[in-house]
Image (tube, rainbow, N blue to C red):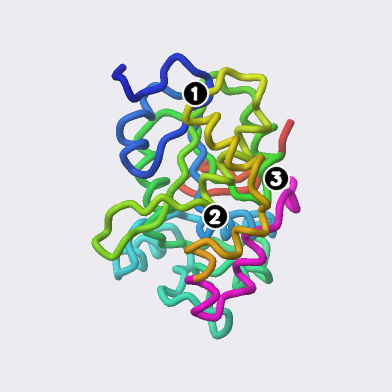
């Protein structure tokens, strides 16, 4: 235990890979939140009966990993059309049930890959399945919520307001628990922010400028899916609340 571990609280919140590396040994459950777009992709795919294998690197290693898992590898360039799937939630909307897809991502996927070293159960959540994720997480005593954030050009963490707001949305559905100060701050962001304002956050503007407005709209829908996304046997699948 150290000054930053939030061990006196049931629900804890900390950012990025450092949170995974430093805090997972003291929790039963990790929820990784990468709204734009890894977590939303996982939600869309698993709702359709797909299996998503997270992988941190967008190179030939991802393709080799896909072959090892008897899966497809997502295309590295985000796009709506053309063969295969990409890190675009919109591109996954017609995924056939049973599809096995390796989804490389430097944020949510990389965090998940790192978290696999722990003994904690691992989930990923987004606005689309906040209530379902909260219901599944009720049974855990110590929960770490990790907003993934994005990357600056020098590869350092850029805290992303959409991830913090979604984290607060999840935590606000677990309010009867003991919340750390960090967790309560996330709740305050969620409860005071009009979610539609997130269309104008940095991550959303970047996607819209690249032509992915449809992805932004999918990412900002709330509680339209009724399943959580749990990592089991290397892949995320749809987990129904009890």
Q: Which one is closest to the eye, mark 1 or mark 3?
A: 1
Nearer mark to the viewer, of 2 and 1: 1
How far apart marks 3 and 2 lie (CA) works out to 16 Å
Residue that protrudes farthest toward the top in the picture:
8
The residue stretch that appears in magenta: 206-227
Horizontal side, residue 173 vs residue 123: left or right: right
Tell me the residue that label 1 is attached to: 180
Task: Specify the label residue 35 is tagged with.
Answer: 2
Q: Is residue 196 left or right of residue 21?
A: right
Q: Which quarter shows the C terminus?
A: top right
State the separation of the CA atoms marked 1 and 3: 26 Å
Residue 95: % across, % down: 64, 68
Task: Give the numbered dot on residue 227.
Answer: 3
Looking at the picture, does residue 26 appear above or below residue 83?
above
Q: Check whether the beta carbons of the residues at disc 3 and disc 2 lie within 8 A of each other.
A: no
Residue 206 versus residue 19 in the image, above or below: below
Which residue is depicted at the point 62% across and 38% down? Answer: 170
Q: Position of residue 69 (x, y in %)?
A: 43, 57
Q: Position of residue 154 (x, y in %)?
A: 24, 61
At 60% across and 33% down in the image, what residue appears? 171
Residue 214 part of the magenta-drawn span: yes
Q: Residues within 10 Å of mark 1 (few under 14, many from 20)?
A: some
Residue drawn 31% across and 17% down?
1
- Front residue of 220/234: it is 220
Q: Is residue 129 magenta?
A: no
């Amino acid at each position: 235990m150290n000054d930053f571990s939030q061990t006196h609280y049931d629900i804890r919140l900390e950012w990025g890979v450092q949170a995974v590396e430093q805090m997972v040994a003291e929790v039963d459950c990790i929820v990784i939140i990468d709204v734009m777009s890894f977590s939303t992709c996982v939600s869309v795919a698993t709702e359709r009966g797909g299996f998503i294998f997270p992988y941190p690197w967008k190179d030939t290693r991802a393709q080799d990993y896909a072959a090892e898992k008897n899966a497809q590898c997502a295309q590295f360039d985000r796009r709506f059309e053309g063969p295969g799937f990409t890190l675009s939630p919109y591109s996954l909307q017609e995924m056939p049930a049973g599809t096995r897809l390796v989804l490389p991502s430097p944020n949510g996927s990389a965090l998940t890959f790192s978290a696999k070293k722990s003994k904690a159960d691992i989930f990923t959540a987004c606005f689309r399945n906040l209530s379902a994720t909260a219901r599944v997480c009720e049974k855990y005593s110590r929960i770490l919520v990790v907003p993934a954030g994005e990357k600056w050009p020098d590869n350092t963490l850029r805290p992303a307001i959409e991830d913090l707001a979604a984290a607060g949305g999840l935590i606000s559905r677990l309010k009867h628990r003991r919340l750390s100060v960090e967790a309560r701050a996330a709740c305050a962001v969620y409860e005071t922010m009009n979610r539609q304002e997130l269309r104008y956050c940095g991550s959303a503007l970047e996607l819209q400028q690249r032509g992915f407005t449809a992805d932004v709209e999918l990412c900002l829908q709330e509680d339209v899916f009724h399943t959580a996304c749990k990592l089991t046997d290397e892949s995320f699948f749809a987990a129904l609340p009890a």
